[in-house]
Image (cartoon, coloured by chain):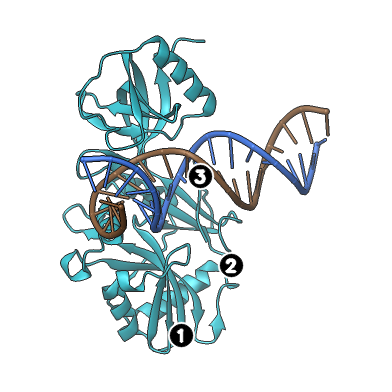
Chain colours: A cyan, B blue, C brown
DNA sequence: GTGCCCCAGTTTGTCGAACA
DNA sequence: TGTTCGACAAACTGGGGCAC
C-alpha cells in the first residue's frame, strides 16, 4: 500500500497523521523462528539488514507480517538520513562496518493465524502498538490526530514530510486507493543553467549551478517533450564555450551543449546531499528561452 | 578507464475506459 | 465527441560493483 502525493492536508475525525520516515520500505515476514525481509518489489533483503532480522527473530515467536521503513536516524540532525540506508543497499559493505539501521513499523498485516488486512487502519495500528510494547528493540511510527501541527513540526525540523491515513481503511495493494496520502516538504533554489546535457540527440537534463555558480547537480524532472525540443533549438542557436572540464557528462554516453546565454531556473528538491548536491531535483520554472 | 547494471522513488507520456 | 481519470511503461537520478 503506497501513499499518494497531495498538496492539501485533509482534516477531520477520519484521518490520522504520521511522520514520513525517509528510508527504504520493507515488509517483514516472521514465521517458525525464521525472518524474511522483502522490498516493495518483493526482492529478498534479509541478508542486507542482519541487525533487523536478528531483532525480529529474537523478539517474536508467532507468525507475523509487518510493514515498515528501514531508516538511519542521525542523532545530531534529529532526523533520518536516507543516504546512509542507500550506502548499505549499494555498497554491499558488511553491516558490522556500517551504521546501525532501525526498523520503524507502521502496519501489522498478519498476526498468528489472523489476517488483519481487512481491519480498519486504526485497529491494525493499535494491535501493532500492543505487540511492540513487548519488544523494545523496534520503533513504532506514532499516529497523531493534529495534521497541520505535525506538518509544522516536520517543516521546522527538516523532516521529509508527513503521511496521512484514513483510519477506517483496510490494507490495499499499490496505489489503487485514496486512503494513504503524503505531503512532502520541498526546498527551492534559484539557479542557472550554462549547458544542456544531450543523450542520443535528445535533451536529457540541464546542468544546474547554484547562486555562487557552484555545480549543484542536474535536473530532468519537469522537462516535457515540447520543452526539450525548445531547449534543443535554443542550444543550437546560442552555442557557448565549455565552462569547465571534465564535464558533468564525462564517462557517460552524453554530450554537453554549452550556452552563450545561461538559462535562469527555479528548481525544487528534497534536500542537500552530503556532498552539496540536490536530491531529487525538479524543474519548476525556466526563464531565458526566446519564444519559437 | 570505460560501460553497464543495480535499485527506489518520482514524473512524464501514452493508451484505454468511463462519463458528460 | 471531447474530456477526465486511472493504469502502466519508460525515463531519469544517485554511487558502487563488476566485467572487460
Q: Quick one: SS at disc 1? A: loop
The residue beneath circle 3 is: A6
Give the residue drawn at x 33%, y 83%.
A57
Q: Classify residue A156 as left or right of residue B11.
A: left
Label 2 resides on the chain identified as A
Percent coordinates x, y for residue C5 in the rendering: 66, 44
List the residue tagged with mark 2.
A170
Dot 1, crowdedness within 10 Å: few (<14), some or many (≥20)?
A: some
Residue found at x 35% / y 46%: A152
Please give the residue where the numbered disc 1 appears in the rendered image. Answer: A63
Q: Residues within 10 Å of mark 2 (few under 14, many from 20)?
A: some
Cα separation between marks 3 and 2: 20 Å
Q: Does the residue at mark 1 contact the one at mark 3 (Cβ under 8 Å)?
A: no
- Residue at 37%, 63% in the rendered image: A69
Q: Quadrant of residue A113?
A: bottom right
Q: Secondary structure at mark 2?
A: loop
Q: Measure the C-alpha gap from mark 1 to mark 3.
A: 35 Å
2 and 1 marks in contact (CB < 8 Å): no
Please report, as a chain letter, where disc 1 is located.
A
- The nearer-to-camera label among 2 and 1 is 1
The reply to whether discs 3 and 2 touch (Cβ–Cβ < 8 Å) is no
Secondary structure at numbered mark 3: loop
Left or right of A30 on screen, residue A55:
left
**Looking at the image, is mark 2 or mark 1 earlier in the sequence?**
1
Q: Is residue C18 above or below residue A9?
A: below
Residue A223 appears in view: yes
Please report whichever mark, 3 or 2, sits nearer to the chain's N-terminal start: 3
In this rendering, the answer to whether A181 lies above or below A96 is above
Residue A77 lies, in percent from the top left, at: 20, 52
Amino acid at each position: 500500500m503506497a501513499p499518494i502525493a497531495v498538496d492539501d492536508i485533509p482534516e477531520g475525525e477520519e484521518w490520522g497523521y504520521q511522520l514520513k520516515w525517509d528510508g527504504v520500505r520493507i515488509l517483514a515476514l516472521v514465521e517458525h523462528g525464521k525472518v524474511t525481509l522483502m522490498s516493495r518489489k518483493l526482492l529478498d533483503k534479509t541478508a542486507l539488514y542482519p541487525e533487523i532480522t536478528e531483532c525480529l527473530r529474537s523478539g517474536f515467536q508467532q507468525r507475523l507480517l509487518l510493514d515498515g521503513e528501514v531508516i538511519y536516524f542521525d542523532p545530531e540532525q534529529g532526523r533520518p538520513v536516507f543516504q546512509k540506508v542507500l550506502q548499505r543497499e549499494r555498497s554491499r559493505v558488511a553491516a558490522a562496518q556500517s551504521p546501525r539501521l532501525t526498523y520503524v513499523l507502521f502496519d501489522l498485516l498478519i498476526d498468528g493465524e489472523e489476517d488483519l488486512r481487512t481491519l480498519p487502519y486504526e485497529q491494525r495500528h493499535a494491535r501493532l502498538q500492543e505487540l511492540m510494547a513487548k519488544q523494545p528493540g523496534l520503533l513504532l511510527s506514532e499516529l497523531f490526530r493534529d495534521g497541520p501541527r505535525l506538518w509544522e513540526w516536520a517543516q521546522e525540523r527538516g523532516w521529509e514530510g508527513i503521511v496521512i491515513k484514513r483510519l477506517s481503511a483496510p490494507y490495499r495493494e499499490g496505489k489503487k486507493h485514496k486512503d494513504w496520502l503524503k505531503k512532502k516538504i520541498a526546498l527551492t533554489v534559484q539557479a542557472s543553467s550554462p549547458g544542456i546535457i544531450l543523450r542520443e540527440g535528445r535533451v536529457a537534463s540541464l546542468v544546474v549551478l547554484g547562486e555562487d555558480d557552484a555545480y549543484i547537480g542536474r535536473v530532468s524532472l519537469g522537462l516535457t517533450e515540447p520543452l526539450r525540443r525548445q531547449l534543443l533549438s535554443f542550444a543550437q542557436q546560442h552555442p557557448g564555450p565549455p565552462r569547465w572540464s571534465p564535464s558533468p557528462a564525462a564517462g557517460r554516453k552524453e554530450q554537453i551543449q554549452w550556452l552563450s546565454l545561461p538559462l535562469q531556473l527555479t528548481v525544487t528538491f528534497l534536500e542537500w546531499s552530503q556532498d552539496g548536491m540536490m536530491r531529487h531535483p525538479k524543474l519548476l520554472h525556466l526563464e531565458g528561452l526566446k519564444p519559437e
